[in-house]
C-alpha cells in the first residue's frame, strides 16, 4: 500500500541547492510527487512505500547540502494520488514569508576546478558560482530569493546558462546568480577620474598596476577593498597616508593555506576557520620573518589573514603575490563603498585605479573578523558570511527592533523568537555612517518581513541610535543598559535563561548613575539586573579624549594610587606630554571639567600600557591595550596586590603602585604586563566567588570588548573553572559592541512578553 506524505522544510533551504537535493533523494528511491519553493520554505509531497519514504527522510536529514540548515520539518499524511514520477514544480507564492536569506558563500571546490580549467567555458571567469557558492545577501533587494529579486535581474541568461538553470540535476539548477562570460557581469578598469582605462584584459592590467605599487580599489562581494602588494613598504606608506590610518592593522589576503602558514602560526582550528565557507579574516600569531612589510600590522603580535572567497580573488592571488593588503574601502569612520560611482567620488583621493564590475552590490557587508577557539569561531566582527543567519531563541519573545550602541554597531530584529543580526555597521560618527544605519534598518525589516512595534536602544541619551529611537516615537521605545545588553547577548547565544553572574568587561557604557561604566559585575537575567560590584571608580580626565590619549588615564590611575604625589611619579615615568600645562591638569582633576568617573577595565588596560611606557597616545581605540597584550609574558602569572571592599568594589591602587615600582626598578615590562593580566583575572574570579556566596548562582557569563584579549579570556576561564563555576562565552555573536543589539532586543522583547496581561 502506497502512502503520501506532505513535508514543509524550513530554515536555510533556498539558494543552497535544496530542491535538486530533494529531487535526487526522492528519484533515487523511486518515489513519486513533487518539490517546490514556497515563501515560507520548501514544500514537498512524496508518494511510495512506507519503507522508501522512511529512507527518504533519513537521507534528507543526514546528507543535507553543505550550506543548507534545517530548522523544522512539518509532516502531514495525505491521500495518495497515484504519482510515480518526481518533479520540481514552479514556486508557490502562498504561505507566510519566513524563508531565510543565506549569507554569501565562498567559491566552492567544483567551481574552482572549472575556473582554472582551460577547457571549461567559464575558464578564468571572475563571476563563476553555483547553488553551493556565490553571492546571496549582498545581491538581494527583496525576498523570496529569486533572480528577479536580485541585482542579477539585469543579466538575462544565455542558452547554455538557462539550460543549467532549468536542469534539476545540474549543480546550477536555480542558482540565481548563475552567469558566464557570454551573459554575465564583466570587469572594467577605471582610472582616477572614473574613465575607463584602455586595455584588453582589465584583470591582467590590474595585476601589473599592483605590482608597480599602485593602490587599487577592487569591487568585491560586500563592498570595495583597497588593495596593495603587501610586500611593498612604499605602497603601504602611501595607503596609510592617504587613508589617514597611521597604525591600525590591515588585513591581508593570501593564495592558500600554505601561503598563510609562511606568515603565521596556524592551529587545526584556525586552519578550518580560514577555509570555512564564511571565510572571515582570522587573527593569527605572526611569524617574524619579514616576508611582508612591517607596516601591515605594526606593534602587533597578530596578523589578520583571509583566504580568497570570490573567483576574482582566486584569479588575482594566482598571479604571484605573496600577499595582498585587502582593507575595507572607505574614508575614516565612513561605511564601506559599494557602488562604482560612489567609490570614484569617496575613494578619489585614495585609490590610483578602480577594478570594477557591473553586478551591483545591494547590501554593504564588510569582511568578518574572528579568532578560532577550540569550540569554534569567536567573532570580533560578524558580517559577510555570517549575516543574516538568524539565531533561534528557545523562549518566546515579542518582536523587537534593536538599534545597538554607538560604535562597532549592528542592529537586530527579533521576529517569532528568531533573532536576525544585521551586518556590521560600524561607528556612527559620520553622516554617511548614520545613513547606513537607516539603510540597514530598512534592509533588515524587509528580509525579516517584520516592522516591530517595540524599539530597543542604549540608555545613553547622546547616542545617534537613541535619537533615531526617539524619532520613531509612534512605537514603544525601551532603553537598555549597555552592560546588561552585553551579558544578555551572551546568554541568548548560549540559550540561557534565569540568573547568571555577568562579567561585563568593556570600554565604555552609560551607567545607571550617568557615569562611564565598563568593569561591571552584574547579577542578571534576561529581564533585569543588579550591579553587584565593579572596578573602583577613577576620573577619566577629558572624557572621550582619554580614549585617544591613554596618558590621561595613566595620570588618573597614579592619582588614585599616590594621592597628591601623583605628579612626582608621572614626571619620573615621563608620561605627561610637554603640551599639557599644570593649569590644564588642575582643571581636569580639581575642577573636574569634562572628567566623568569611570569603572572601565578597557581604560585600565590603556592606562597601564601608558605607565609602562608603551604609548601615551593612540591612533585607534584599544591600540595601547592590544600592545599590552602583545608584549605580555604569559609565563609570568604573578598576582599583584589589590583589594576588594565590602561593596565588591575592586581597588587597584596597590597593583598600580607595584607596577610603577617594578618599572622604576627596571623589571622588564613584558613581565609586568603578564602580571597585570594575571592580577585582573584573579580579581574578576574573586569577585565572582563572593557573588556566588551571597546569591548561590554558579553560572558565569563573560562579555564585553575586553574579552577580545585572549590572555585575559583564557586566564579568567582557567580561574573560574578551577573554582567550579559553569562558564559561558561568546562565539558567533561578537563579544564587543557588535553583539549589544541582540542583548537589547532580547531584554525589550522579554519584558514585553512578561508584561502582557
Ligand atoms: Zn560553486
Ligand atoms: Zn551564460
Ligand atoms: Fe560595550
Image (tube, rainbow, N blue to C red):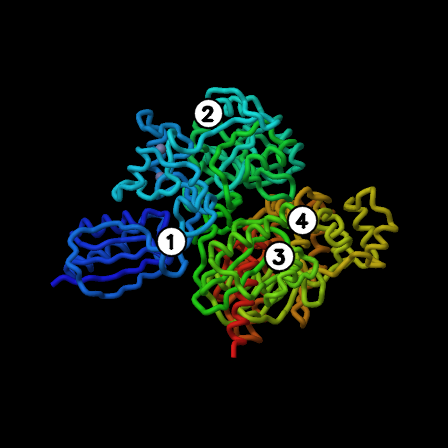
Q: Tell me the crowding category of disc 3: few under 14, some 14 to 19, or many 20 or more residues within 10 angstroms, Cα based.
A: many
C-alpha span from label 3 to label 2: 42 Å
Which numbered disc, 1 or 2, marks the residue that appears first in the sequence? Answer: 1
- Where's the N terminus, which quadrant? bottom left
Residue 320 marker: 2
The spot of residue 305 in percent (x, y) is 50, 39
Give the residue drawn at x 59%, y 28%: 194
Q: Are marks 1 and 2 in contact (CB under 8 Å)?
A: no
User: Which circle, 1 or 3, is nearer the viewer?
Assistant: 1
Q: Tell me the crowding category of disc 2: few under 14, some 14 to 19, or many 20 or more residues within 10 angstroms, Cα based.
A: few
User: Which circle, 1 or 2, is nearer the viewer?
Assistant: 1
Q: Which residue is disc 4 drawn over?
A: 429
From the Cβ of disc 3, is ligand 3 less than 8 Å away?
Answer: yes
Mark yes or no: residue 273 visible. no
Q: Which residue is disc 3 drawn over?
A: 405
Which numbered disc, 4 or 2, marks the residue that appears first in the sequence? Answer: 2
Give the residue drawn at x 57%, y 39%: 337
Give the residue drawn at x 67%, y 72%: 646
Which numbered disc, 3 or 2, marks the residue that appears first in the sequence? Answer: 2
Q: Nearer the viewer, residue 692 or 492?
A: 492
User: Which circle, 3 or 2, is nearer the viewer?
Assistant: 3
SS class, disc 4: loop
Q: Is residue 716 left or right of residue 512?
A: left
Mark yes or no: residue 390 visible. yes
Amino acid at each position: 500500500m502506497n502512502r503520501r506524505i506532505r513535508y514543509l522544510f524550513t530554515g536555510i533551504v533556498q539558494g543552497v541547492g535544496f530542491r535538486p537535493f530533494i529531487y535526487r533523494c526522492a528519484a533515487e528511491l523511486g518515489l513519486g510527487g513533487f518539490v517546490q519553493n514556497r515563501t515560507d520554505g520548501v514544500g514537498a509531497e512524496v508518494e511510495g512505500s512506507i519503507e522508501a519514504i522512511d529512507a527518504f527522510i533519513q537521507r534528507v536529514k543526514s546528507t543535507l547540502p553543505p550550506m543548507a540548515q534545517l530548522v523544522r520539518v512539518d509532516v502531514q499524511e495525505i491521500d495518495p494520488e497515484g504519482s510515480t514520477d518526481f518533479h520540481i514544480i514552479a514556486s508557490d507564492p502562498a504561505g507566510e514569508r519566513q524563508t531565510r536569506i543565506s549569507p554569501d558563500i565562498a567559491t566552492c571546490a567544483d567551481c574552482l576546478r572549472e575556473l582554472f580549467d582551460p577547457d571549461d567555458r567559464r575558464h578564468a571567469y571572475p563571476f563563476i558560482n553555483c547553488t553551493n557558492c556565490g553571492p546571496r545577501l549582498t545581491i538581494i533587494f527583496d525576498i523570496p530569493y529569486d533572480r528577479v529579486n536580485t541585482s542579477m535581474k539585469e543579466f538575462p541568461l544565455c542558452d547554455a546558462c538557462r539550460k543549467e538553470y532549468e536542469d534539476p540535476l545540474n549543480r546550477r539548477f536555480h542558482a540565481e546568480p548563475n552567469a558566464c562570460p557570454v551573459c554575465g557581469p564583466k570587469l572594467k578598469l577605471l582610472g582616477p577620474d572614473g574613465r575607463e582605462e584602455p586595455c584588453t584584459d582589465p584583470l591582467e592590467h590590474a595585476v601589473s598596476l599592483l605590482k608597480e605599487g599602485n593602490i587599487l580599489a577592487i569591487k568585491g562581494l560586500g563592498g570595495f577593498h583597497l588593495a596593495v602588494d603587501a610586500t611593498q613598504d612604499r605602497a603601504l606608506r602611501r595607503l596609510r597616508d592617504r587613508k589617514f590610518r597611521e597604525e591600525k592593522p590591515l588585513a591581508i589576503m593570501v593564495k592558500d593555506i600554505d601561503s598563510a602558514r609562511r606568515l603565521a602560526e596556524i592551529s587545526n582550528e584556525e586552519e578550518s576557520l580560514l577555509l570555512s565557507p564564511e571565510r572571515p579574516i582570522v587573527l593569527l600569531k605572526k611569524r617574524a620573518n619579514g616576508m611582508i612589510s612591517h607596516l601591515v600590522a605594526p606593534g602587533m603580535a597578530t596578523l589578520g589573514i583571509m583566504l580568497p572567497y570570490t573567483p576574482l580573488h582566486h584569479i588575482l592571488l594566482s598571479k604571484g603575490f605573496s600577499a595582498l593588503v585587502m582593507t575595507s574601502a572607505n574614508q575614516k569612520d565612513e561605511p564601506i563603498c559599494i557602488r562604482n560611482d560612489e567609490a570614484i567620488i569617496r575613494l578619489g583621493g585614495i585609490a590610483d585605479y578602480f577594478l570594477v564590475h557591473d553586478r551591483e552590490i545591494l547590501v554593504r557587508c564588510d569582511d568578518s573578523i574572528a579568532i578560532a577557539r577550540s569550540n569554534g569561531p569567536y567573532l570580533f566582527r560578524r558580517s559577510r558570511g555570517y549575516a543574516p543567519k538568524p539565531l533561534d531563541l528557545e523562549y518566546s519573545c515579542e518582536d523587537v527592533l534593536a538599534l545597538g550602541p554607538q560604535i562597532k554597531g549592528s542592529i537586530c530584529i527579533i521576529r517569532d523568537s528568531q533573532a536576525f543580526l544585521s551586518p556590521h555597521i560600524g561607528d556612527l560618527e559620520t553622516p554617511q555612517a548614520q545613513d547606513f544605519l537607516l539603510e540597514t534598518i530598512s534592509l533588515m525589516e524587509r528580509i525579516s518581513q517584520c516592522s516591530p512595534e517595540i524599539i530597543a536602544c542604549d540608555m545613553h541619551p547622546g547616542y545617534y541610535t537613541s535619537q533615531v529611537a526617539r524619532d520613531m516615537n509612534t512605537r514603544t521605545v525601551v532603553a537598555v543598559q549597555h552592560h546588561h545588553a552585553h551579558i544578555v547577548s551572551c546568554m541568548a547565544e548560549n540559550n540561557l535563561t534565569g540568573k547568571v553572574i555577568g562579567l561585563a568587561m568593556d570600554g565604555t557604557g552609560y551607567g545607571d548613575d550617568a557615569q562611564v561604566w565598563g568593569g561591571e559585575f552584574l547579577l542578571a537575567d534576561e529581564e533585569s539586573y543588579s550591579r553587584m560590584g565593579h572596578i573602583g571608580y577613577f576620573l577619566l580626565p577629558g572624557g572621550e579624549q582619554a580614549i585617544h590619549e591613554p596618558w590621561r588615564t595613566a595620570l588618573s590611575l597614579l592619582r588614585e594610587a599616590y594621592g597628591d604625589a601623583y605628579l612626582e611619579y608621572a614626571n619620573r615615568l615621563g608620561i605627561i606630554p610637554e603640551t599639557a600645562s599644570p593649569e590644564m591638569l588642575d582643571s581636569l582633576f580639581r575642577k573636574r571639567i569634562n572628567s566623568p568617573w569611570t569603572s572601565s577595565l578597557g581604560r585600565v588596560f590603556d592606562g597601564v600600557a601608558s605607565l609602562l611606557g608603551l604609548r601615551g597616545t593612540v591612533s585607534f581605540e584599544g591600540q595601547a591595550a592590544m600592545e599590552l597584550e602583545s608584549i605580555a609574558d604569559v609565563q609570568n602569572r604573578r598576582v599583584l596586590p589589590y583589594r576588594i571592599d565590602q561593596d565588591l568594589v575592586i581597588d587597584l591602587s596597590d597593583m598600580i603602585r607595584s607596577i610603577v615600582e617594578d618599572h622604576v626598578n627596571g623589571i622588564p615590562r613584558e613581565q609586568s604586563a603578564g602580571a597585570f593580566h594575571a592580577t585582573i583575572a584573579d580579581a574578576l574570579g574573586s569577585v565572582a566567588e563572593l557573588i556566588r556566596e551571597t546569591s548561590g548562582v554558579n553560572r558565569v557569563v563573560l562579555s564585553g570588548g575586553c574579552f577580545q584579549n585572549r590572555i585575559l579570556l583564557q586566564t579568567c576561564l582557567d580561574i573560574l573553572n578551577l573554582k567550579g563555576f559553569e562558564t559561558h562565552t561568546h562565539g558567533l555573536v561578537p563579544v564587543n559592541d557588535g553583539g549589544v543589539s541582540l542583548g537589547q532586543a532580547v531584554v525589550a522583547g522579554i519584558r514585553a512578553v512578561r508584561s502582557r496581561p
